[in-house]
Amino acid sequence: MSKPIDWIKVSTLFSTSATLILVLFTYIQVSRYENSMKADFAHRMKKDFFNESQRNILFLFNNDLLEFKLFTNSDSSVYFPYFSLNKERVKYFQNDSIKLLPNVKDSYTTYEIEDLILNHFEDLNLYRKNGLIDDEYLYNGYTWYVESMYENKQIVKLLEWMNSGSEKNDSYSGFKELYLFIQKYENVKGIHR
């Protein structure tokens, strides 16, 4: 004689299986959505970073056309840091009929440099640490910019000036952390340039 079917167990098994399938389906959909959102975020971030102003500043720094300077008043009590365009070097990049770059100024405040370049690197490091951008994407898309700015003599002077003083700040520590991450990433991945 055959055993009667226990419909309660069958329905429990069926509902449990259906729930597991729904959970798996939802997980796949959420993962796809998350990847899509990360891609959209990375695209918007890239558009913010690679605009005309940033490209101009990067060009100026990478061709040693900006110099870090301190303006002091007559009694040397007030310091005003800024970056000055090296007009002697500019002559190597233009002639009388061609303008070097659109909208290039003779000087830039440190606030402008921070807003246009350094704060972006701080943000990149924060996004990396919070998993908003992929390490490989960050490495492939931003390594040259991070290294060229972090190793730039004039940026080094600015950071040294910002971190000197009685309180010993650690201005732009995220920028440094990002630079060190890139070095470590290359070692871990065995990348040789």
Image (cartoon, rainbow, N blue to C red):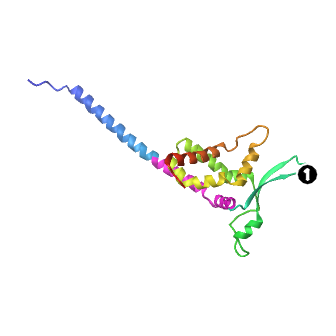
**Is residue 52 one of those drawn in magenta?**
yes
- The foreground one among 64 and 50 is 64
**Residue 58 is drawn in which quadrant?**
bottom right
**Residue 173: image x %, image y %?**
66, 42
Left or right, 19 with respect to 40, comes to left
**Residue 145 is drawn in which quadrant?**
bottom right
**Residue 170: image x %, image y %?**
70, 41
Image quarter (top left, top right, bottom left or bottom right) of the N terminus: top left
**SS state under label 1:** loop
Judged by its main secondary structure, the magenta piece is helix
Kindly identify which residue carries mark 1: 74
Left or right, 117 with respect to 20, comes to right
Magenta-colored span: 35-62
Left or right, 104 with respect to 126, comes to right
Identify the amino acid type marked 1: Ser
Q: Is residue 101 above or below residue 192?
A: below
**Residue 35: image x %, image y %?**
46, 47
Residue at left 49%, top 48%?
189
Q: Is residue 133 above or below residue 53?
A: above
Q: Is residue 158 above or below residue 21?
A: below
Image quarter (top left, top right, bottom left or bottom right) of the C terminus: bottom right
Q: Is residue 178 above or below residue 92?
A: above
Residue at left 74%, top 70%?
91
